[in-house]
Image (spheres, rainbow, N blue to C red):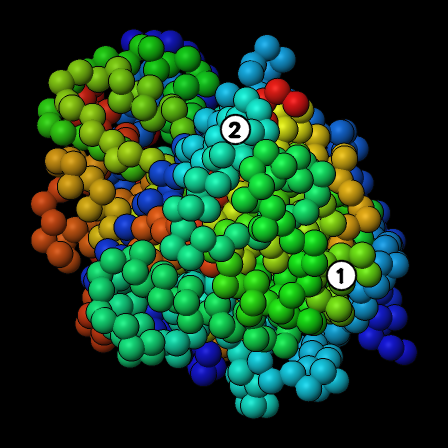
Amino acid sequence: MDSKAKILGNLRLPITDKLTNAISEIRDSHIYRDYPTADEDLLQIFKARLSSLHGELYIAESTAEAAAFIARIIESQKNKTCLIQNVPLTRRICNENKDLNKYLVQDLSMDSQLLAKYEMSVTVADYLIARTGSIFLNSISAGGRRLSILPPIHMVVAEKKQIVRSLEDVLTRINSQASYSTIITGPSRTADIEKQLVLGAHGPKRLIVVLLQNT
Amino acid sequence: MNISRANVSLFIPCLVDQVYPEIGMAMAKVLRYFGYNLQYHQQQTCCGQPAFNAGHRKKARVVAENFIEVFYNDSLIVAPSGSCVAMVRNYYPTLFQGHAREEQAVQLSKKVFEFSEFLDREGLIEKITGSFPGRVGFHNSCHSYRELGVKDEPFKILDRIKGFQLLQPKGESVCCGFGGLFSFKFDEIAATMANTRLGMFTSIGVNTIVSNDPGCIMHLRQEAQDKNIDVEIIHLTEFLVIAMDLK
Amino acid sequence: MKAEYSQFQAASRIKSRDQVHLTKIAKAIDTYDNAVAEMQSRQYVNWQKACTAAAEIKECALHDLASLLEEFEKNISGRGAKVLWAQNAHEARQHILSIINAHNARKVVKSKSMTTEEIGFNEFFEGQGIEVFETDLGELIVQLAGEKPYHIVTPAMHKSTSEIAQLFHKKFGIPISDNAEELTMAARAYLRNAYVTADVGVTGANFIIADEGAIVVTENEGNARLTISCPKVHIVLVGIEKIIPKLSQLSLFLPLLATIGTGQQITCYNSIIRGPKKSDEMDGPEEMYVILIDNGRSDIYRNSTFREALRCIRCGACLNTCPVYRTIGGHTYHTAYQGPIGSVITPHLCGFTQWNHLSFASSLCASCTQVCPVNIEIHRLLLENRWEAFKGKHIGITWKFSLAFWAFIASRRSRMNLLRKVVKPGLKVLTKLLPASKRKHIPEMSSKSFADIWSAYGQ
């Protein structure tokens, strides 16, 4: 008998213990004190949460404004290297500033050692979660797995309509076609050295969300 | 002050009987003050907890059977110890599951009370008045706190007494390190735990620690004596006898 | 006395007297306590209700464990992952070794995983000539120091900044610094190269999801994400009990684990992985293996008294609250799983004979039970383990005899009275024979027993 059969055989017991309670559906609105209520501004909540985690939010009234902001951030980097995921939203923004076009990359399958040299990446996301200040993206929508974790600055371009209330809203809408999804909540951090908070432990030190308000 | 003529059976833990009888006497004085008829069954010995906690359930049952025989006719049984009451209330049903005395054990488990929870459920706390000097902290025994759910009762009692300053370490109640035979088998760990617990009180200026479990009192007193830590450690019953000036 | 027991006694004596260690651990746990209390009240309408919901879900999962594991296997295999089953640590190591050899891998990066500790991953694979890089900062620190993890969530809790600085100076050649950021950046630089050149990435999983056919890894640093994204092969080693039925239940479990694990609303990165990279994806591992490990868990499962121990989500709360853990620290246990839950499961997983003493090294204060986010009655399981130890004849003859004698005396008042006449003077003699540390625990008997006083007053 192989290991699987042995293990499962051990686990197939007629368990007669009654379950204490049939699991009723758990709703975030019942569990969480900080669940955003209907009349609350989700954008403000998202902003507050993201900031408290040392994430940055830039609200752009237009794609032109977004383009200018992105250009400034790239400019401020030492080597001015950047990888921008090539998708409709980013193309629209790059259209506003031709200088940005050179950063658009279609093929992100390059060697990791090469990818690691870039100072910054710009990706899109699936959703922004207000309650926790999180970004939800997957390996199909965000240009793979590495793009949002290797470069020290990760910039996310998103639209206001992508903001949802809480984690449950994202889990019901997950793209099961992608091999990998991740919920990002702030820049990378550690407190392993005497509980002192340090950002940028392995993942990005800066997480910047560029939010398009009027699209 | 006669409130009631009910019968209360005194459950005197072996540690009180043999080492700290004054705690038992103090409890008797308080209960008598409230008008209870007190019964003390001379045949009582121990609830069996030492053997039970050591894992020897067979032998624990032997001792517990004597307890059941002695007490099963009583309707109200009070002990100055949360751990002993927890043994009977929470563990006798398990200990006697499938045994001849199972029904008696289950019945008995509903009739035992720790001293402060007894005063509370009988509505006696509001009748307490008195005064006590100094800076007092309360050490709630883990068994009272977590096995019996006795959290507020001791503080409601302390609240009735004037004069002293109540200084309580912040956060949850932390174990003194007694744990019965644990303090013997793992004596260094237990001593450090006692030291840590004492420090939580002395560092905020407490000069009298009041507790509701004789085991905790014994263990803390030993460490205080060993390390020359200047703090009085008394039982809640003793505190009340002093505060209420009972004879 | 068993070697493990005497080792425990010796180590715990040393730690109990080590004021530097006691202060360090108290400070670390104090920070944790404050963060957790704040987050519990900030995030939750009712923390206890959330724990009850989590406990119920875990009970449901355990109720249907076999079929949920099959569902998980079917779903994740459908997406190209290969599921392997390991009855014990040896099989798990062999599975991983085959994979490593099949890919001619020499370099492995791994994120923090207690199951890899459990199977002695580092020792075994380093012994096979494989370069193993711990990527979690705390794990890296203890790996470089040649130590075992001190705590299941914060492995380097016992190391001060200056100790880490000395270590990094020695290993990376960086100047000695008392700046946590500089030290972290040094580790980051060292590991960056490892991520991008490693052949295989190894992780554990915090949860495995049956309906989605996915594994979940939760972290703050990003090292797990890098471990899962860069190398061509991803191996997951996860205990069979980690399963939860539905993806949607993560909206309860992820914040719960973060709140009680580190006092965070949710951890920085929570990744849900359904398989290796798909053909239309830019990057990711070409192969993914999930090794489901038993290693004694099914034995615990089959014992209905202990089954609830398998609800454990490895949050570390019981370690942090335990006054014994706070006194002796993590290394004293000499096991992969420490603290209260470790003391419950280790005798079952690794042998009652050698490890039952852990279940006795507790004052049964029940603080562990109080804090557990899945309502495991940990202290009651310790008591049950003690009974198991007796039943299995793992208890020494001296103890057995002493307890039997005590029970004989304590079951009849007449015997107690008689013995008192003998014991009082006897005790004084006995007390002098004991070592000082034990002597003080022998109480001084009062001149009269309560029974004597009561009958004297004629009451």
In the shown orientation, is residue C20 left or right of residue A30? left
Residue nearer the viewer, B227 or B27? B227
Question: Image quadrant of residue C289?
Answer: bottom right
Q: Is residue C75 above or below residue A123?
A: below
Q: Does the image show residue C108?
A: yes
Classify mark 1: residues with Cα within 10 Å, few (<14), some (14-19) or many (20+): many
Judge if badges 2 and 1 mark residues of a common chain: no
Residue C184 marker: none
Query: Residue C126, position in %: x, y?
Result: 54, 85
The residue drawn where x is 48% and y is 30% is A58
Q: Is residue C75 above or below residue B44?
A: below
- Observer-side mark, 2 or 1, equals 2
The residue drawn where x is 70% and y is 72% is C233
Chain letter belonging to callout 1: C
The residue drawn where x is 32% and y is 45% is C30
Query: Residue C254, position in %: x, y?
Result: 60, 42
Residue nearer the viewer, C402 or B6? C402
The residue drawn where x is 70% and y is 54% is A106
Quadrant location of the N terminus of chain A in the rendered image: bottom right
Question: Image quadrant of residue C144?
Answer: bottom left
Q: Amino acid at mark 2?
A: Glu
* Tag 2–tag 1 contact (CB < 8 Å): no
Q: CA distance from mark 2 to mark 1?
A: 35 Å
Q: Is residue C418 above or below residue C262?
A: below
Q: Amino acid at mark 1?
A: Lys
Quadrant location of the C terminus of chain A in the rendered image: top right
Q: Is residue C133 above or below residue A71?
A: below
Query: Residue C42, position in %: x, y?
Result: 46, 27
In the shown orientation, is residue C427 left or right of residue C284? left
Which residue corresponds to mark 1? Answer: C277
Which residue corresponds to mark 2? Answer: A65
